[in-house]
Amino acid sequence: MDADSLLLSLELASGSGQGLSPDRRASLLTSLMLVKRDYRFARVLFWGRILGLVADYYIAQGLSEDQLAPRKTLYRRSGAQGDVDVVGSLNCTEWSLLPPATEEMATQTAVVSGRFMGDPSHEYEHTEIQKVNEGEKVFDEEVVVQIKEETRLVSIIDQIDKAVAIIPRGALFKTPFGVTHVNRTFEGLPLSEIRKLSSYFHFREAIDLKNKTLLEKADLNPSLDFMDSLEYDIPKGSWSIQMERGNALVVLRSLLWPGLTFYHAPRSKNYGYIYVGTGEKNMDLPFML
């Protein structure tokens, strides 16, 4: 959700229980405005919150003028005793910048499961079997690998972004030069389109679209239909679409990553998504559908 309309966005997403206290809303809004100024972002999104056993991670993302360019991700911790950053300060305006996600991080953290602790310096231990050569002999040896929670946090945020971060069709447009901008003329989806998964796109570079034939792309508008549609997500049925407030609000919830909520008020510019959850993927979903 866009930080510029944070209070309204939190109100629209409150139907899923993702609420904040008034004082926390105020401090969050102030701190996000400072992040936008200090880092010189074109837009700042309040991404959501990952719940930990000791403390929670509040996540924000900074975007450049090109909306699909790599985003900068920041976090701060919040525990039972109030807002604290990574060094334990009570200054709730402090955010820490996370490193970019890599394939190596995803491979490394794939072996970690369970809840986050809420401490970025916490280290998970994983035992691996590695082959060791001693002369002509080869034998297996157990090696303990330590994985920092901060690395896992980066990887999980990246996975959620690629899988379930979404926007309505028409909210962005692509120029002939390949740059993606916010569509200032977007006035919201019509009521006839809001229940269709084809009206929503993944908020990332297209993956499946590149594999379509020219015949399949014939009816697409290259300036608007340049991202992957939710219509072809696997497994089918991984999205729940509901109308709320007397059809004045459409809400999409991900069943693959429980905690991700997208909201949009039809015929308006109010849309966004927020994740509030434990950072655990529902691996049993294909068997539940």
Image: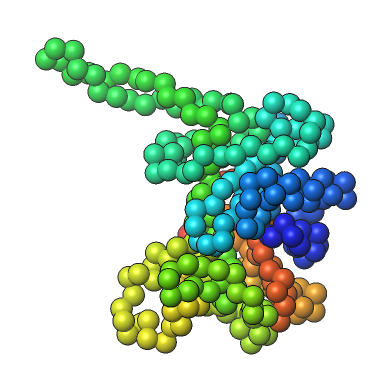
Q: Nearer the viewer, residue 252 or 267?
A: 267
| Image position, residue 10 (x, y; %) | 77, 59
Q: Residue at x 58, y 56 (%)?
A: 63
Q: Residue at x 45, y 63 (%)?
A: 205
Q: Residue at x 78, y 37 (%)?
A: 92
| Image position, residue 188 (x, y; %) | 67, 79
Q: Report the residue that reaches farthest toward the top.
A: 135
- Establish if 148 lies above or below 206: above
| Image position, residue 144 (x, y; %) | 41, 21
- Establish if 126 lies above or below 38: above
Image quadrant where residue 74 sits: top right
- Establish if 169 lies above or below 39: below
Please give the count of numbered marks on the rendered protein. Answer: 0
Q: Nearer the viewer, residue 267 or 67?
A: 67
Q: Is residue 13 visible?
A: yes
Q: Nearer the viewer, residue 154 or 195?
A: 154
Q: Report the residue that reaches farthest toward the left.
A: 136
**How is the model colour-coded?**
rainbow
Viewed as shown, does residue 51 lie left or right of 287? right
Viewed as shown, does residue 190 lie left or right of 285? right
Query: Quarter holding the N terminus?
Result: bottom right
Image quadrant where residue 137 sits: top left
- Establish if 216 lies above or below 202: below
Q: Residue at x 82, y 50 (%)?
A: 25
Image quadrant where residue 248 sits: bottom right
| Image position, residue 66 (x, y; %) | 52, 62
Q: Is residue 289 visible?
A: no
